[in-house]
Image (spheres, grey):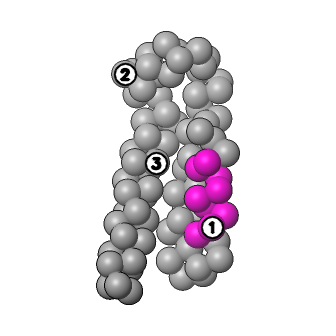
């Protein structure tokens, strides 16, 4: 059972890194399709970039969380606050 929990934990961890990693970079570097999609959701350029920076901070916190586990929780909360 602990093997399954460990597998689920690290799979979710990798998922967060992947999804928020590329999404934050697309927003910060203003990829055209991302900017268009965010505009369709009602966010202007400034808000899109700020959301991208927030997501990027969360990704950095997740990476730091590999070495300091309590920071992982802060990073995951950051993502929930941005949603």
Query: Quick one: label 2 or label 1, which is nearer the N terminus?
Result: 2
Q: In the rendered view, would you say 18 is above or below 68?
A: above
Tell me what residue is drawn at x 65 percent, y 24 percent.
46
Marks 2 and 1 close (CB-CB < 8 Å): no
- Comparing marks 3 and 1, which lies closer to the viewer? 1
Marks 3 and 1 close (CB-CB < 8 Å): no
Q: Measuring from the top left, give residue 20's x and y in whole percent.
A: 46, 48
- Residue named by callout 3: 20
**Badge 1 local density, few (<14 within 10 Å), some, or many (20+)?**
few
Disc 3 from disc 1: Cα separation: 15 Å
Query: Quick one: label 3 or label 1, which is nearer the N terminus?
Result: 3
- Comparing marks 2 and 3, which lies closer to the viewer? 3
* Secondary structure state at the residue bearing disc 1: helix
In reply to whether residue 78 is colored magenta, the answer given is yes
Q: Say which quadrant the N terminus sits in.
A: bottom left
Q: Nearer the viewer, residue 14 or 24?
A: 14
Q: Say which quadrant the C terminus sits in.
A: top right
Q: Is residue 82 visible?
A: yes
Magenta segment's dominant SS is helix
Query: Quick one: label 2 or label 3, which is nearer the N terminus?
Result: 3
- Residue named by callout 2: 33
* Secondary structure state at the residue bearing disc 3: helix
Disc 2 from disc 1: Cα separation: 31 Å
- Res 2 quadrant in image: bottom left
Disc 2 from disc 3: Cα separation: 16 Å
**Badge 2 local density, few (<14 within 10 Å), some, or many (20+)?**
few
- Residue named by callout 1: 73
Tell me what residue is drawn at x 66 percent, y 64 percent.
74
In reply to whether residue 15 is colored magenta, the answer given is no
Q: Is residue 10 visible?
A: no
Q: Which mark, residue 31?
A: none
The residue segment tinted magenta is 72-80
């Amino acid at each position: 059972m602990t093997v399954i929990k460990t597998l689920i934990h690290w799979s979710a961890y990798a998922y967060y890194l992947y999804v928020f990693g590329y999404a934050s970079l697309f927003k910060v570097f203003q990829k055209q399709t991302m900017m268009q999609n965010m505009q369709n959701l009602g966010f202007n350029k400034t808000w899109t970039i700020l959301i991208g920076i927030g997501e990027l901070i969360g990704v950095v916190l997740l990476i730091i969380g590999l070495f300091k586990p309590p920071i992982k929780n802060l990073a995951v909360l950051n993502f929930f606050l941005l949603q």
